[in-house]
Amino acid sequence: MAAAVVTAASEATERWFYGGGIHRWLVMNEDTDGAFFLHEEVLEGGKSTPLHTHPAIETMIVLEGAILMHISGRESRVEAGGVAVAPAGEPHAFHVLTDTARLLCLHTPGTCQAFYLEASTPLDDHTERCVDFDRVRSAATATGGMTIVGPPPFLGR
């Protein structure tokens, strides 16, 4: 059984995700005996993800801003206070509609953490914040934490 976990905001591990955006890792897979992985994402307007799947359930709670969530061919606007849940193996993608957005992302179980670790780097004042989808694809292949199944379904937005 995992021990209790308390993470102060100042204790969160910050990483630059090569798919675009800052991740603040709050609860790690190993903290929960694999039950879940929880992180916050800080994103810029216009960011789109490719259509992809995860081997875990991905729950996204919009804390600030708004996203367009695409799950199984259906699009829904999700604003602050809203939630979107992509079942394991279900194709999904999202597009940031506002100037910025903050999302709380929960992966259940926490098996996707290895992917995010491989597809990101520690964030500091010298981190080059570039988008590198080759690195994201490589991390997806190496870890099995994500499978890209198509381009962003939001072309022209």
Image (tube, rainbow, N blue to C red):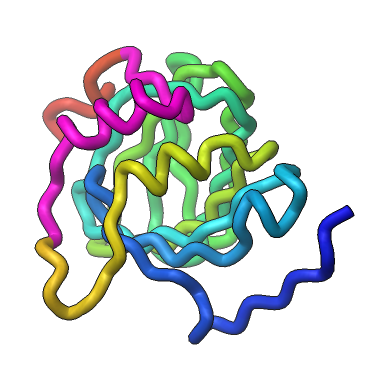
> Quadrant location of residue 55?
top right
Can you tell which quarter of the image residue 8 is in?
Answer: bottom right
Quadrant housing the C terminus: top left
From what the image shows, is residue 14 above or below residue 55?
below
Magenta segment includes 147: yes
Could you tell me residue 112's position as x and y percent? 52, 37
Viewer can see residue 57: yes
Give the x, y percent position of residue 142: 36, 25
Q: Is residue 84 above or below residue 102?
A: above
Could you tell whether 125 is left or right of 74 in the image? left
25 in the magenta segment = no
* Residue 43: percent from left, percent from top: 30, 58
Question: Which residue is painted at 89% across and 53% down in the image?
Answer: 1
**Where 107 sits versus 120, above or below?**
above
The answer to whether residue 92 is visible is no
What residue lies at 63% left-to-right and 42% top-to-bottom?
110
Q: Which residues are magenta?
A: 129-149
| Extreme-right residue of the structure | 1
Q: Position of residue 19 (x, y in %)?
A: 25, 43
Image position of 135 (left or right of 6): left
Q: Residue at x 23, y 76 (%)?
A: 124
Foreground of the two, 81 or 143: 143
Q: How many marks?
A: 0
